[in-house]
Image (cartoon, rainbow, N blue to C red):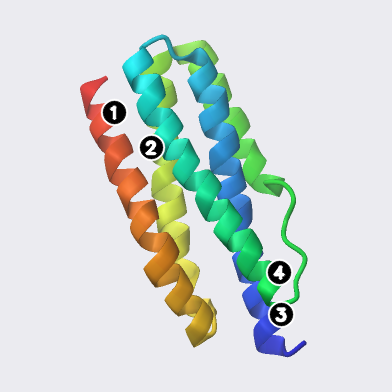
């Protein structure tokens, strides 16, 4: 494996851990929600993160790497969001999700240039637009809560 490929695998796995954390965080927040309309919207956003995790998993395998299996240190954000939902209620949980969406978007934008051109193209065209869409959708949900 070349250094570029190894670096791509490491970075894609970092993105993958972020997506896995997002799926976990949505799970924990959805459990606390009572508004069925908000739950349905959050499930759709969670599914978007799940699809991105699958795309990143496939991409890491395509490059000959071993995909991350869990969120690693990213999981601590999921625990924080869960705690917010328990202690501060639903609007705080949605706000924590939005903060996670901000963080995810910022990570992609900050680290995309660390990738080789082919992997950068994949992230910019396949992953980032969907990350921006979920970010914007969650912002709308938060403004209504």
Contact check, label 2 and label 4, Cβ < 8 Å: no
User: According to the image, label 2 marks what residue?
Assistant: 98
Contact check, label 4 and label 3, Cβ < 8 Å: no
Neighbour tally class for label 4: few under 14, some 14-19, many 20 plus, Cα within 10 Å: few
Sequence order check, earlier mark of 1 and 3: 3
Q: Is residue 78 above or below residue 54?
A: above
The label shown at residue 142 is 1
Contact check, label 1 and label 2, Cβ < 8 Å: yes
Sequence order check, earlier mark of 1 and 2: 2
Contact check, label 1 and label 3, Cβ < 8 Å: no
Q: State the image coordinates of residue 43 (x, y, percent, origin top left).
A: 45, 30
* Residue at 58 percent of width and 53 percent of height: 53
* Residue at 74 percent of width and 50 percent of height: 69
User: According to the image, label 3 marks what residue?
Assistant: 6
Contact check, label 2 and label 3, Cβ < 8 Å: no
* Residue at 75 percent of width and 71 percent of height: 65
In the rendered view of the protein, which quadrant contains the N terminus?
Answer: bottom right
Quarter residue 10 falls in:
bottom right
Sequence order check, earlier mark of 2 and 3: 3
The label nearer to you, 4 versus 1, is 4
Give the alpha-carbon distance from disc 1 to disc 3, as whole Å.
39 Å
Sequence order check, earlier mark of 2 and 4: 4
User: According to the image, label 4 marks what residue?
Assistant: 61
């Amino acid at each position: 494996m070349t250094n570029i490929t190894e670096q791509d695998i490491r970075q894609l796995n970092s993105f993958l851990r972020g997506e896995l954390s997002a799926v976990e965080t949505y799970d924990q927040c959805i459990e606390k929600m009572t508004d069925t309309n908000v739950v349905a919207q959050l499930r759709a956003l969670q599914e978007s993160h799940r699809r991105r995790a699958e795309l990143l998993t496939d991409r890491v395998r395509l490059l000959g790497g071993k995909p991350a299996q869990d969120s690693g240190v990213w999981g601590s954000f999921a625990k924080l969001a869960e705690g917010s939902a328990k202690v501060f209620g639903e609007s705080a949980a949605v706000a924590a999700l939005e903060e996670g969406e901000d963080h995810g978007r910022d990570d992609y934008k900050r680290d995309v240039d660390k990738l080789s051109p082919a992997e950068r193209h994949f992230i910019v065209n396949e992953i980032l637009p969907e990350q921006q869409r979920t970010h914007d959708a969650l912002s709308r949900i938060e403004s209504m809560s």
